Each structure stands twice: as C-alpha cells, then as structure tokens.
Image (spheres, grey):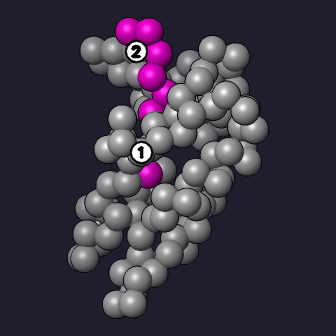
Amino acid sequence: MNGSNSGGVIRLKSWQEFKRIANEPKTTVIVYNFEQNAFSSTRELTCLRLILPGQGVQYVFLDFPKEGNLRETGIGLCKDRRGNRYLDDEDVIKFLKTQFGKSDLMICSYWTI
C-alpha cells in the first residue's frame, strides 16, 4: 500500500488504491465528505474526502477539482445560480454505487453517521 500511516489513518494516494481496498469483501461502508477548495476565492465545496473505516484504521482518499470534474474519479461538478461550483450528494452516491455494485455496501455522508 502506498500511503502514510499516522495514528490509525492511512492516506491513499490514488483512486486505484481506494478501489482495490473498497472492493475487498470485508468493506461494508464508504463515508464521504465535501470540503472547501482552498484555492477557490469563493471557498467552493469541490473537494471530496472518501473514508473506508476499518478495525483500528481509516483509509482516506482525497479528490480535487480539475476544470469541471474531480481529477481522479471524474465526478462532475454542479453550479449554483451564482456560478459557484459544488458537489452533489446524489451524484457521489450514484457514482460509488456504480463503481462498486455491492448490494450490502452502505454509502453515507460524514455528517449522517
């Protein structure tokens, strides 16, 4: 694994690494969170944090915007009526369900746990 371990958190460097771990049979939950883009003057919610909770460890993957999509996953960004970009919960959930296709996989926002 190509991540750094610090206090039970392993940061995954690529979408491929995240997919490999998420596809393991023991993975039953993916947690996501939207974060502010520090490079945006309007602090758009365009950064995606994906978390795979495990026993004594959390695997974390971060994806950042590049033009109209996220760089690694390719999830499209939405725009509000003022032109601010953001990520939509339904788009992220649909994407993750399509990618992993596990009937027992629970996908939830960090704030709904």
Give the structural element (helix, strand or loop) at label 2: strand
Q: Quadrant of residue 105?
A: top right
Judged left or right of residue 41, residue 65 is right
Classify 22 as above or below 61. above
Q: Which residue is mark 1?
A: 109
Q: Quadrant of residue 46?
A: bottom left
Please count the marks in the image.
Answer: 2
- Camera-side mark, 1 or 2: 1
How far across and down, in percent of the image, does residue 107 sit? 54, 39
Q: Residue at x 40, y 15 (%)?
A: 57
What amino acid is found at the position of numbered circle 1 in the picture? Ser
Q: Residue at x 70, y 16 (%)?
A: 25
Classify 9 as above or below 33. above
First of labels 1, 2 by sequence position: 2
Check disc 2: other Cα within 10 Å, few if <14, some if 14-19, many if 20+: some
Q: Are marks 1 and 2 in contact (CB under 8 Å)?
A: no
How far across and down, in percent of the image, does residue 104 sit? 67, 28
Which label was assigned to residue 57? 2
How far across and down, in percent of the image, does residue 63 sit? 48, 50
* Residue interval drawn in magenta: 48-56
Q: Quadrant of residue 7?
A: top left
Q: Residue at x 58, y 61 (%)?
A: 91
How far across and down, in percent of the image, does residue 49 sit? 42, 44
Q: Main secondary structure of the magenta part?
A: strand
Check disc 1: other Cα within 10 Å, few if <14, some if 14-19, many if 20+: some
Distance of mark 1 from mark 2, alpha carbons? 18 Å
* Quarter of the C terminus within the rendering: top left
What amino acid is found at the position of numbered circle 2 in the picture? Val
Whether residue 7 is visible here, answered yes or no, is yes
